[in-house]
Amino acid sequence: MFAPGELRLLLLLLLDEQDRHGYELIKAIEELAAGAYAPSPGVVYPTLSLLVDEGMIAEVPGEGARKAFTMTDAGRAELAPRLEEAKAVVQRLGDFGKARAEAEGRTGSPPLRRAMANLMIALRQRAGRGLDEPTAHQIADILDEAARKIERLESAQ
């Protein structure tokens, strides 16, 4: 997802906006990508540790046991000449998220995405326990009825 040095640059940009802990940074990146991508903790936390070691960011007290991070003057000095590059990374993440959503036919509605994910989880769990023919037909009938109801909905526009 990132070229060498781009995750580092993005973390600096996000920390320049406000102090955050690692999980908040992961979620912020996921939000920039419209939910289509989230970096793994195994990539983010080592990068944060490196930035701390280099003096680009510093740890500050966070909520509970979580460590928050804040920008240092050295971090701001590194970010300043590369600000446009950092903004381009943000733009690319947003473009990626939009393209992925369009390709998957996803809606921008978080409640609808949540409901669709819940349906998929329920189907996988039920199928994982095994389906006999009558149960498979019952599930298919439920889904067919839901599809008919959705098709009959009138648009509020």
Image (cartoon, rainbow, N blue to C red):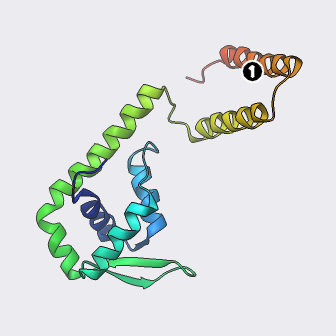
Q: Position of residue 97 (x, y in %)?
A: 39, 39
Residue in the picture at 11% in, 65% down: 81
Residue farthest along the left direction in this orientation? 81
Q: Position of residue 108 (x, y in %)?
A: 50, 35
**In-image side of 146 versus 29 (left or right):** right
Q: Nearer the viewer, residue 127 or 65?
A: 127
Tally of marks: 1
Query: Where 125 sits versus 33, above or below?
Result: above
Q: Position of residue 6 (x, y in %)?
A: 24, 57
Query: Where 148 sits versus 128, above or below?
Result: above
Q: In terms of image quadrants, where is residue 133? A: top right
Residue farthest along the right direction in this orientation? 134
Q: In terms of image quadrants, where is residue 85? A: bottom left
Quick one: SS at disc 1?
A: helix
Residue in the picture at 66% in, 15% down: 151
Query: Where 44 sits versus 149, above or below?
Result: below
Q: Residues within 10 Å of mark 1 (few under 14, many from 20)?
A: few
Residue farthest along the bottom direction in this orientation? 61
Q: Quadrant of the C terminus?
A: top right
Q: In terms of image quadrants, where is residue 115? A: top right
Q: Position of residue 128 (x, y in %)?
A: 75, 35
Residue in the picture at 45% in, 62% down: 41
**In-image side of 111 versus 52 (left or right):** right
Residue that carries the numbered disc 1 in the rendered image? 143
Residue in the picture at 15% in, 68% down: 80
- Amino acid type, label 1: Leu
Q: Nearer the viewer, residue 26 or 54?
A: 54
